[in-house]
Amino acid sequence: MNRLFPTRKKAEEIFETVIQKRNATKYPFKPEWETEFRKHCHAVASIAEKIAGCCPGLDSEKAYVLGLLHDCGRCVDEFAENRFHANVGFDWMMSEGYDDVARVCITHSFYDKDFDIEKFTQPYDDLLKCQAYLKNVTYNDYDLLLQLADVLNDKGTTCTIEYRFASLARRYNNPGILIHVKQLQQIKAYFEQICGRNIYDLVGVKYDKTQISGSGHGRETLACGNS
Ligand SMILES: [Fe+2]
């Protein structure tokens, strides 16, 4: 069967094209956004690669490539151009024959594949296309892996799930997104069971473990650090 994702080398080239395409639009990255985007995508790639490397049956190169390109739809400014980056990335990767990358462009954006369209603010037509696509998809381990890897890094900083969601809720003024914290914790636990390791330790999230046992509430603090 053909590989439905590029090699690591080709993926790095495509990643540079994402930046070039975006910077050739009317709405280029500001320098600090470009830096954050580069750091985030490379960090998500290496987080996914590390976890996959400890999970029998998962291909760590595929995980890296999917991580690097999961946000390739950011080649357009989705707000200024009224598009959803999930669809932009999906259409581009499908046109290249990289169906596996196209898939995660959409699946990493929807923790519930049967999502309620009214709860999203992206363009309606794009959401309808995502809904139609996801009808025929059953989430596999790569979909879950990329959802998890994406929330373990915030703007280039490797962090806890709670930190990432708090940051997203602030950035998009959408506290409703916090409802998904538990779901991502379950995905983390799922991979911890497969690989027999604590995922935060594996990927280098720095958090204060004394707070977990010492607080009496069983909660992790939102501390984070560079990976
Ligand atoms: Fe991302």
Image (cartoon, rainbow, N blue to C red):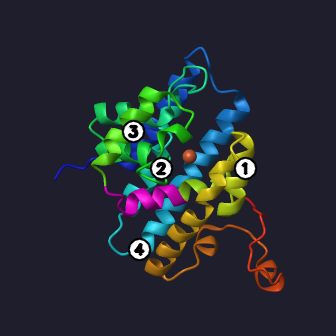
Discs 3/4, front: 3
Reading the chain from its start, which is encountered first: label 4 or label 1? 4
CA separation in Å, label 1 and label 2 = 17 Å
Q: Mark 4 or mark 1, which is nearer to you?
A: 1
- Which residues are the magenta region? 138-148
Which badge, 2 or 3, comes first in the chain's sequence?
A: 2
Q: Earlier in the sequence, mark 2 or mark 4?
A: 4
The amino acid on which the numbered mark 1 sits, given as a three-letter code, is Ser
**For disc 2, does the CB lie below 8 Å from ligand 1?**
yes
Residue type at numbered disc 2: His
Q: Nearer the viewer, mark 1 or mark 3?
A: 3
Residue contact at pointers 1 and 2, CB within 8 angstroms:
no
Question: Which is more N-terminal, label 2 or label 1?
Answer: 2
Residue, disc 3:
130
- Using residue 130 as the reference point, say whether residue 71 is left or right of it: right
| Residue beneath the point at 68% across and 67% down | 205
Comparing 112 with 10, the one in front is 112
Question: Tag 3, which secondary structure?
Answer: helix
Disc 3 residue type (three-letter): Cys
Q: Residue furthest top?
A: 26
Which label lies toward us, 2 or 3? 3
Residue sitting at x 58%, y 68%? 185
Q: What is the spatial separation of the Cα atoms under label 1 and label 3, in whole angstroms?
A: 25 Å
Q: So how many labels did they put on this image?
A: 4
Look at the numbered disc 2 and give the secondary structure of its residue: loop
Residue matched to label 1? 167
Mark 4 touches mark 1? (CB < 8 Å) = no
| Type of secondary structure dominating the magenta stretch | helix
Mark 3 neighbour density, 10 Å: few (under 14) some (14–19) many (20 or more): many
